[in-house]
Image (cartoon, grey):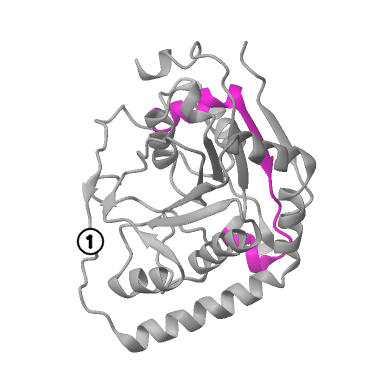
Amino acid sequence: MAASAKTVTAKTTSLNGDWTIVLPRRTRGRRRTCPTIRIQERQPLQQPVNWAPTDFEVNSLRESRLKQKMQICMKKLEASKFFLDLLNQIQSPEIIHSFHKVLGLESNMQMVIYGIGSIESYENPRLQLSLALLLKRKFNWIGGIEVFDPVLSATESRVLEFLGCSVLSVNEQGRRKVQKPTLFFMPHCEAELYDNLLQENWRAGQLNNIVLFGNSFENYERLVFEFKNSTVASARHMLSVRRFTDEFKIETVSDDYFGAFHDSSWHFFSPVIELGLQDVNS
């Protein structure tokens, strides 16, 4: 029997060689906005391709300035009420149990960051990366961090490595086949990227190994409800997996963090049998 989808609100807050990355815009009055789903016919599967920054020049001054920006950003975020509330949310009995259930007998889970954007050009990507780094610092069960975005420059890649991350040399298009517990950190990515990840791991044993931090699947489902007669190819797996998903929403507490984290949720998947997963890929 499939588990019922559950949403918990905690008091915390184009794909070719490239991706189309959504960077959230600042909104007045912290108005809630829904994620965008592209309505389209089914496209050929996107496959991983080798990748390297298009700019080969590393500017030492830019690198130094970016390191300083990241240090300032991490200190600001670490001292914020948003971060303290988020830590409390993660350590609540229900969510910490969900993490431990995914970990099983493993001592840690790898973190994979997709679609972080340009950390040199925009503050929101710096805030998102800072959160990932601070979570690793706070929780010893978070392992190494791998990062990929096709917009990353050579300078940004060097700074990411300085911060302890590994920059992937392959654009996986989100198609990472999970073998062990893995935390995918994907705030404000497009629906296609989430769907690629789910499709690549569309088996009970693999979905059970995934924790996903990203756009609320519940909000996607609500948006799709408005297009009853349309085929939403970019979100088929996201909609189907809702039956097996425990979703824990976060709330941002100030305009400082709204742009980077609004409409974000923790997602845990728990299909108990393959039945119900079969029809989506056909």
- Using the image, determine if residue 21 lies above or below residue 267: below
**Relative image position of residue 1 (x, y in whole percent):** 62, 10
Horizontal relation, residue 153 to residue 22: left or right: left
User: Quadrant where the C terminus lies?
Assistant: top left
Residue at left offset 36%, top offset 71%: 156
Q: Residue at x 64, y 60 (%)?
A: 258
- Judging depth in this view, the residue of 161 and 260 nearest the camera is 161
Q: Could you tell me what secondary structure mostly forms the magenta stretch?
A: helix
User: Going by the image, does 26 lie left or right of 63?
Assistant: right
Q: Secondary structure at mark 1?
A: loop
Q: Mark 1 belongs to which amino acid?
A: Ala
What is the quadrant of residue 29 in the picture? Answer: bottom right
The stretch drawn in magenta includes residue 16: no
Residue ID at (74%, 61%): 253
Quadrant of res 65: bottom left
Q: Which residue is mark 1?
A: 52
* Residue range (magenta): 233-260
Position above or below: 132 against 230: below
What percent of the width, then of the height, locates residue 207? 50, 29
Residue 104, given in percent of the width and then of the height, sits at 60, 34
Question: Most extreme residue toward the bottom, as rendered?
Answer: 61
Q: Residue at x 63, y 76 (%)?
A: 75
Q: Is residue 12 above or below residue 227?
A: below
Residue 235 lies in the magenta stretch: yes
